[in-house]
Image (cartoon, rainbow, N blue to C red):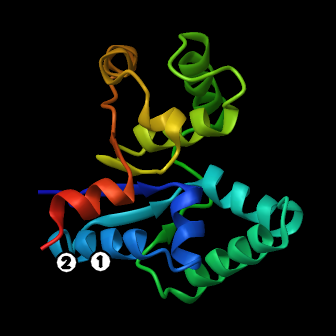
């Protein structure tokens, strides 16, 4: 059996860098219960971290983004950064556009739609995100849309949900 692929959103990595207890607890739970899970940092997440490290709206955001990048580089986390996907960026952008055009995500949520498209295309079973737009997505509609591409939707959960549901 292949290990679970877990995609980690930018906000989760920022919270890990900021040592948010619930997020650290969720990652510890995932690590202990799913030790073989492949924790992926998708290209869109890496792009967003790089942008935030340079042009984040506050000093704290810039500092946390730089710390998150450093944690990924130093392998203090089990996260595996993906610089590119085995599919073209055109395909990712087309699928992301369908999420927005179909009303699954607001038109302005280009970045969230890219992360979701990358997670689906990488066959991630779980997308760990605190983003309300992703959390509020109509999972049935997402399933129908992705079915047409022979893709399965990831379960989208927040670190707090993981910590609450699976803590000892």
Residue at screen point 79% across, 71% down? 62
| Quarter of the view holding residue 72 | bottom right
> How far from the left and from the top, in percent, is residue 133?
53, 33
Which quadrant: the C terminus? bottom left
Label 2 sits on a secondary structure element that is helix
Q: Nearer the viewer, residue 159 or 145?
A: 159
Residue at screen point 30% across, 54% down? 161
| Quarter of the view holding residue 26 | bottom left
Residue 109: which disc? none
> How far from the left and from the top, in percent, is residue 64?
69, 74
In this view, 126 is above or below 109: below
In this view, 141 is above or below 73: above
In this view, 132 is above or below 54: above
In this view, 95 is above or below 156: above
The residue furthest top is 102
For label 2, the residue is: 32
> How far from the left and from the top, in percent, is residue 20?
49, 74
For label 1, the residue is: 28
Label 1 sits on a secondary structure element that is helix
Q: Nearer the viewer, residue 48 or 150?
A: 48
Tags 1 and 2 touching, CB below 8 Å: yes
């Amino acid at each position: 059996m292949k290990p679970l692929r877990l995609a980690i959103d930018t906000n989760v990595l920022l919270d890990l860098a900021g040592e948010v207890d619930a997020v650290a607890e969720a990652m510890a739970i995932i690590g202990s219960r799913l030790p073989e899970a492949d924790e992926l940092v998708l290209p869109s997440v890496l792009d967003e971290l790089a942008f935030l490290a340079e042009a984040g709206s506050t000093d704290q955001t810039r500092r946390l983004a730089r710390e998150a990048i450093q944690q990924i580089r130093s392998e203090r986390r089990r996260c595996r950064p993906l610089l590119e996907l085995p599919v073209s960026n055109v395909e990712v952008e087309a699928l992301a556009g369908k999420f927005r055009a179909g009303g699954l995500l607001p038109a302005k949520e280009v970045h969230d739609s890219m992360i979701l498209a990358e997670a689906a295309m990488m066959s991630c079973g779980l997308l760990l995100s605190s983003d309300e737009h992703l959390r509020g997505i109509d999972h049935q509609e997402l399933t129908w849309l992705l079915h047409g591409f022979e893709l399965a939707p990831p379960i989208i959960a927040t670190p707090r949900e993981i910590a609450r549901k699976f803590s000892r």
